[in-house]
Each structure stands twice: as structure tokens, then as C-alpha cells.
Amino acid sequence: MIVIHNQRVKSFIGALHSSAPFPALVTEPDAENSCHLGLWLLGEGKLQYGGNAALYRQLQERHARLHALAREAKALYDAGDKKGALQKGMDLERENEKLMALLKQ
């Protein structure tokens, strides 16, 4: 799941650089609950981390923040603000690093 998730983040960043199509289940409404990581968090992830309510809540919040940043980046990209989109992409990468650190706890 982590490998697939990180590949999707890289694909999204690549799309912001105009080198790849935007991956599905990133910017769509409710993508947080239908992407690979979202489905994992609702199932296996909840079993693994649900006993620690604070940590599980942080995972959900960081994951939702990733999708929010992706939506913001895509909106900037679509509006022709490539520089702004790339900056949001950098924010997304930093947020993803924080999420990965939480998952490794």
C-alpha cells in the first residue's frame, strides 16, 4: 500500500511538470475514501492503528490534507499558474513525508 501510494504521489507531481497524465482518485470529490490509501485506512489501517485514536486521527487528517493540497495544485495548474501548482506540489510532498513518518511509528 505504501509503495502504491508513493507512486501515485510521484505520478501527480510528474503531471504538474507536464510529464504524465494526472492519476485518478486524487482530486475527485471523496477521493480520500476511494484511493488506495483511503481504502486501506478504512480497513486494514483502522485495525492496525485504530487502537491509538490520536495517531489514527492524525493519519486520517494528513491523508485528507494530501488530497486538499492536490486539489489546490490541480486548480492552479488548470488556471495556468504552473509555478503556483508546483509550489503546492512541494507542499504535498512535504505533507506526504510527514504522513509516511506517522505510518512508520
Image: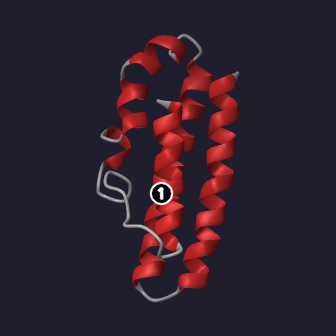
- Seen at 39% across and 81% down, the residue is 78
- Seen at 62% across and 27% down, the residue is 103
* Colour mapping used in the image: secondary structure
Residue 11: x, y in percent? 47, 57
- Seen at 60% across and 33% down, the residue is 58
Q: How many marks?
A: 1
Q: Is residue 36 above or below residue 76?
A: above
Residue 99: x, y in percent? 62, 38
Q: Quadrant of residue 35?
A: top left
Residue 91: x, y in percent? 65, 61
Q: Is residue 103 above or below residue 95?
A: above
- Seen at 37% across and 25% down, the residue is 42
Q: Of all residues shown, which one is farthest toward the front?
A: 19
Q: Is residue 23 above or below residue 17?
A: above
With 40 as the anchor, is 89 left or right in this view? right
Crowding around mark 1 (Cα neighbors within 10 Å: few <14, some 14 to 19, many 20+) is some
Q: Secondary structure at mark 1?
A: helix
Q: Quadrant of residue 32?
A: top left
Residue type marked 1: Ser
Residues 78 and 33: in front is: 78
With 27 as the anchor, is 59 left or right in this view? right
Residue 101: x, y in percent? 70, 33
Residue identifier under label 1 = 11
With 72 as the anchor, is 53 left or right in this view? right
Q: Quadrant of the C terminus?
A: top right
Residues 52 and 84: in front is: 84
